Image: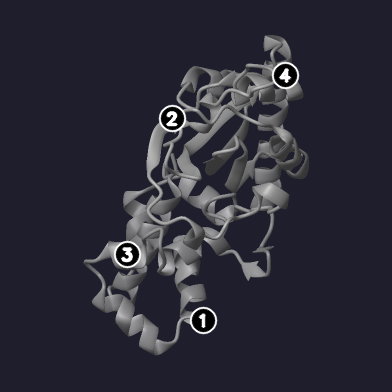
Amino acid sequence: MRSFIHLSRTSLVPRLTILNVPKTRMTIDQFVEKKSGETLNRLLEKRYNLKSVSRNDKKAASEFQLYHISMTGYMTRFGFLELTSLDVDPRFDKEDLIKYIDDLRFDPATIDHELPKQYFNYYAMSYRNPNDNVARDEKIAFNKAVKEEQLRRERLDTINGFYIPRSLEESFVQLDKIMPEKERKILVSLENQPDKYNSDAGGLGIWIRTNWGIIDGSRLKTYFNERNFHDPKKISGIIVAQYIKYLKRESQVARNWERTHPRI
């Protein structure tokens, strides 16, 4: 879950103090610290003894364990970086990183000379252990831990207080229990509008993905994985679309779907 920590100069600055602040094409990691003459990215590499990797480097992501940092902020006329957001992998101590950035002073020469501060583009960088073998071992250990957690979740009938259906048919039974009749009728009216019931902004689909372990793993997710469905949004879309057919009294909906989508 995204979280923000606001401390001293890096605290969230009210946007009303600066109106119509333009963005620049320069990203935060390109700023040079006055004392060392090095970029923020290079300073972070040294501080954490890591090697930076582009977020677009798919080969590195598949081979090595990566740790992520994302941030946005303002550069002030005095060379201070005021963060408006900071998202970090658990590998990093967020408070330590905020304090470290707070103590740096950068060359502000690139900001508009008429502005007291200027907003800079979203910065997202990944880092890995500079030793290839260690970075590979970390990736193997991480994948193993993820697999073990998935297997653990597959054995649970309840996760975070929510009962997890075992199949498409059982999902209908559970939806009947939690959805009032009025909402079921509304859902049927949206049959041809999946953007209304399965979007990332809201609707029944995102509730299913969040609470039935479709994203992080569950026995219901495994049920669909065994039928070659892996994308969480696709899975929740199937559940809701088939549930609408069930509400319209179409006979043997779940069994018909299973017949055309057998285990692989």
Amino acid carrying label 3: it is Ala
- The CA span between labels 2 and 1 is 53 Å
Q: Earlier in the sequence, mark 1 or mark 4?
A: 4
Residue receiving disc 4:
46
The residue at 48%/21% (across/down) is 57
Where residue 11 appears, as percent x and y from the top left, is 65, 53
Nearest to viewer (mark 2 / mark 4): 2
Q: Secondary structure at mark 3?
A: helix
Given residues 123 and 235, the one toward you in this image is 123
Secondary structure beneath disc 2? strand
Whether the residues at callouts 3 and 4 have beta carbons within 8 Å, the answer is: no
Q: CA distance from mark 2 to mark 4?
A: 22 Å
Residue 261 visible in the snapshot: yes
Query: In front here: 230 or 142?
Result: 142
Could you say whether the residue bearing mark 4 is in a helix, strand or loop? helix
Q: Quadrant of residue 25?
A: top left
Residue placed under numbered mark 1 in the picture: 177
Q: Nearer the viewer, mark 3 or mark 4?
A: 4
Judged left or right of residue 73, residue 188 is left
Q: x%, y% of residue 137?
A: 72, 19
Question: Badge 2 is on which residue?
Answer: 26
